[in-house]
Amino acid sequence: MKLLTVETRQYLQYYHSRYQQVEALGAELYVLNGEGTEDFWPADRYRLVGTKNIEDMIATAKQWHAVEDFAGVITFSEAAVVAVAAIAEALGLPGIGVEAALNSRNKLLMRQAHERAGAPIPGFRYVTELAQARDAAREFGYPVIIKPTLGAGSHFVFKCDDDAELVEHYEQAAAGIREMFWANSEADGIDLGPNGLLVESFLDGKEYLMEAVSWDGELYLGSVVDRITAEGGTFDDDVHHAPTSMSAEDLVAVHEVVKAGALAQGLRRSVMHAEVRFHDGRPHLLEIAARVGGGGLDMIARITAEHDPIAAVVAIGADRRPDVRHFRPTGTHITAMCLISEAGVVDRVVVPEEVSGSDRVFLLKITASPGDEIKRPPDGNTILGFLGTTGTSEQDALALMTDFASKIRVEFR
């Protein structure tokens, strides 16, 4: 089976490990990049368009499809979800459709879809100037959240506790989104909806992340992860624990909320990364992305819930029902984190053998290379990589992960 995967703008080598997983599952993977480097993937299965204009990408994909006869088109990149939907439609292959892709990419369109369906969400206002943001904050009451409509990875997402912080962070976010990789990596020639800022009411409960599948009206929560981060003014310092500590009753409520959101967005056959936060004892939708979660969430799903999000991508890409079940934990505990450093230009990252050689480390991925610039809030949200450990309990896994993280050293130029 031949599958085509797409990146509108190549994101380093970040998705290579997932491409390799796709091939390990028996698919032959072909890679189409709009903008990128020449030697990104084996030459006989790689095309570089040289532009991320959607018409040029579609034309290249059509020519290639006529020769290779792809079974489907997939992506792991948030910035390519809409482009992949357009390419799949043009090739007559399975896909979520452009409208559902837009509802799953643009946070304003997503909120509007949720609102129409009556799904529980925070209060929200789309704002184009500071005065509107301040009016929304007065309406909702502090604290409020400010976030980009075309963001990803918590870039330029801020919690504002008062008017002074709103003024400061509004200017930072408004300036930041003009240069943000994820917004600027979307395909050209598609109306993505407003590229601006949302002000949202703050949800004060616990947050959970799910790798899920929607298939013909049913919603499957494949894995459920607790976010255990001690929060500050930004949402970049991600620390996770799985399996979830959520009660059975809360899981039922979350399932219904995610199902309502998926149907509202138009996701009938799709993998999903869903984020939910509780408020006043009820789950509310933060977002539902039409892709699998980043970092090591696919590995976490396999270890703690025997759910394989990558296998689901392959099956759904070929229009086959994936092998999926409702959430059932294995009993293995993990904790995982983003590796955060100070800002600067990386000279090297040093990982001791004690860490890299441990059989309790299931996730160790250094994404920063020598010469990369690490940006930290309010200028950006670049991380060094990811670290995850297993344990007999949350406390056991967390203690080891914290110790190992302290031993990974970054040297700056």
Image (cartoon, rainbow, N blue to C red):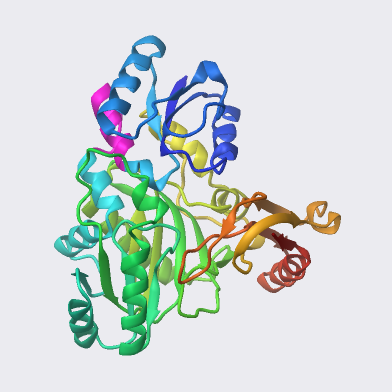
Marks counted in the figure total: 0
- Could you tell me if residue 252 is visible in this image? no
- Could you tell me if residue 259 is visible in this image? yes
Q: Is 272 on the left-hand or right-hand side of 301?
A: left
- For the record, the magenta segment spans 82-97
Quarter of the figure with residue 268: top left
Q: Position of residue 216 (x, y in %)?
A: 28, 41
Camera-nearest residue between 388 and 316: 388
The residue lying furthest to the left in this view is 116
Q: Residue at x 67, y 58 (%)?
A: 387
Q: Position of residue 266 (x, y in %)?
A: 23, 47
Question: Magenta stretch mostly in which secondary structure?
Answer: helix
Does the magenta run of residues contain 86? Answer: yes
The residue lying furthest to the front in this view is 413
Q: Is 303 on the left-hand or right-hand side of 376?
A: right
Q: Residue at x 35, y 49 (%)?
A: 184
Q: Residue at x 60, y 55 (%)?
A: 304
Q: Residue at x 62, y 50 (%)?
A: 367
